[in-house]
Image (tube, rainbow, N blue to C red):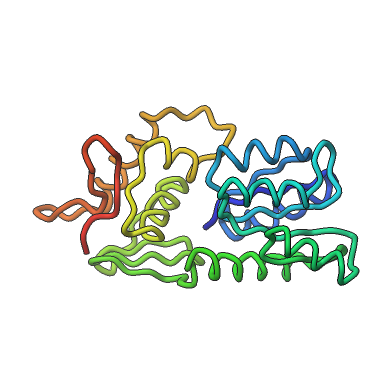
Amino acid sequence: MAKILIVEDEADLAELVKNWLVKDHHLVEIADDGLEALIRMETNNYDVVILDIMLPSVNGMEICKRYRKSGGSAGIIMVTAKGHVDDKETGLDSGADDYMTKPFQLKELAARVRAVLRRNHGQAQDVMRFRDLEIDVNEFKVLKGGHEVHLLPKEFRLFEFFLRHPHQVFSAEDLLSSVWESDTEALLDTVRGHVTRVRKKLDTAGTPSIIATVYGVGYKLGEA
């Protein structure tokens, strides 16, 4: 699962792409204006941005340049009707990871998203193991000691997020911007509540929690 922003002012196309990627269990948002997209990209932790070039307010090339200059690390796939090699070169030189020309196949776009995730975030594994737990991202399934444990979608994404970043500490604010929708009304207590529920479902009595608390800072994946 990844948090993805689609920046596209063709509403029908944006919805089509969103629906396709949601089927892969990604968390997907849409922005139809360049300035709105730039603000979202600077205030949320997206894994991938699918970025059109021709946009109101600020064009995709400029968005990409500004975002990279500010240190933004999300994978960026540029999508445009311009297919000339010079346009592709300009897009890639501005900081994009990949470039697709309209019209495109949704299946190919989904494959490009997976490739960018593997390159930029090391998300090559669809099945991950931690202690007696096994998580299958494609099947949206978690096994504990060989028995399936039901996690709600946000609980699943939260646990997967920690597995993808095993040595990092995240504040509740970080988790809110990485795991929840950017327009969510969720509060920091919501994050803490989800951490508590994941622990209750996946922890083993007598052993350290799978999500460790770093007091005064936030949370991290527990020791293996």
- Pinpoint residue 102: horizontal percent, then vertical percent: 86, 63
Which residue lies at the image location 34% right of the left edge and 62% below the top edge? Answer: 148
Q: Is residue 194 left or right of residue 111?
A: left
Q: Nearer the viewer, residue 68 or 186?
A: 68
Residue 95 against residue 176 in the figure, above or below? below
- Image position of 26 (left or right of 161): right
Give the quarter of the figure containing the C terminus: bottom left
Image coordinates for residue 215, horizontal then vertical, percent: 21, 38
Residue 116, compared with residue 21, is above or below; it is below
Which one is nearer the viewer's eye here, 205 or 190?
190
Q: Give the vertical position of 12 relative to 139 (above or below).
A: above
Left-right relation of 98 to 79: left
Quadrant assignment, res 89:
bottom right
Q: Residue at x 28, y 69 (%)?
A: 146
Kindly identify the residue that appears in the image at 84 percent across and 58 percent down.
80
In the foreground, 160 or 217: 217
Q: Residue at x 75, y 59 (%)?
A: 78
Q: Is residue 21 left or right of residue 179?
A: right
Q: How many numbered circles are shown?
A: 0
Residue 106, image x and y in percent? 75, 64
Which image quadrant for residue 112? bottom right
